[in-house]
Amino acid sequence: PVIAPGSSGAWDDERIKQPWVRRSGTTGQYQMWYTGSGTMSGPQIGYAWSSSPDGFGGSKYGSPVIPYRNMYPWDYNGVSRPVVLLNPGGGGSSSYYWEAWVTGQCTGGQYRGLYYRGTSPTSWTPGHSSPVLDVGGQAAWDSHMASPQTVIKDGSTYKMWYLGNNGTTYAVGYATSPDGITWTKHSGNPVFTGLNGTWEVNIGACHVLYYGGRYRMIYLGLGSPGKLGLAYSTDGINWTRAN
């Protein structure tokens, strides 16, 4: 493995998963934020980096960069699934700042989207006092989970694709925001769902890219076994599977 769990007693000695990777446009360094968990602690967000051109030979930061605070109901059981952006801020290089959306594992078994601001890849503080992406009502398709999966800033608009769950079924929703904090869910959610009787009965995770004039979604289909699929969209809402 290019990144492995920590040694016995480390905060991430049990497992590491859910990496979010970007490549610095100035240094060429690969930067990774990941979910780590230990035998004595719940999931938290760690950081690793590699200066190798192939992304191998990574080094890990020694402690969680976004720990769970164990004092609020929305992250009492841990934080996971980092989604990270470097925001230019509109005022030159001195105004650049980091933004992260993570999934808080709440008391009561629900999952909500939280927001953090950073002055560096390893220095983060809560950017809002409560969840910025909440679960839906009792009968909603996302009543148990609203977990950010990808955020893209398109001009002045943030676009998010998130994983929702109602206790049995997973699907992908879409939301927009003017500031990364106040989100409006699409009225036609979910925008991407599994297919009964196929290898992708449920959607377990997704990542969205935009290039060449269209969006591309790589998603995890939860069948037996799980597999990856690809879908395309021109608006981020209406999707067509590649196969």
Image (cartoon, helix red, strand yellow):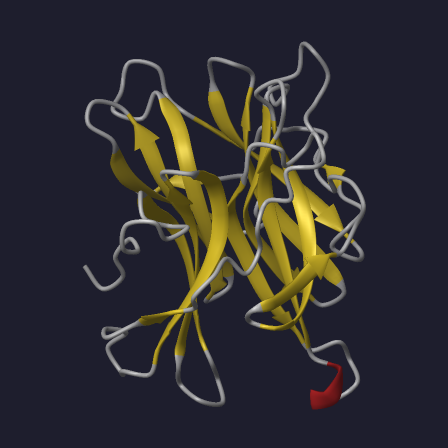
Residue furthest out toward the front: 9
Residue 81: horizontal and vertical position, in percent?
49, 46
Q: In the figure, 219 relative to 100: above or below?
A: above
Residue found farthest to the top: 139
Q: How many marks?
A: 0
Q: Give the left or right position of residue 146, taking residue 155 as reference.
A: left
Relative horizontal placement of residue 151, taking residue 133 as reference (left or right): left
Query: 38 or 107: which is nearer to us?
Result: 38
The vertical placement of 187 against 25, above or below, is above
Residue 17 visible somewhere in the drawing:
yes
Residue 102 coordinates in the image, percent (x, y): 58, 47
* Residue found 74% across the figure and 55% down from its top: 180
| Quadrant of image for the C terminus | top left
- The residue sitting at 76% across, 43% down in the picture is 183
Q: Is residue 220 above or below residue 116?
A: above
Is residue 124 shown left or right of residue 2? right
Which quarter of the rendered picture does the N terminus lie within?
bottom left
Q: Nearer the viewer, residue 239 or 229?
A: 229
Examine the rendered structure and indicate whether residue 180 appears above or below residue 237: below
Q: Is residue 243 visible?
A: no
Q: Quadrant of residue 70?
A: top right
Q: Residue at x 43, y 66 (%)?
A: 62
User: Looking at the image, which residue is at 70% across and 29% down?
Assistant: 73
Q: Where does residue 85 sit, x and y in percent of width and height?
A: 59, 65
Q: Nearer the viewer, residue 166 or 103?
A: 103
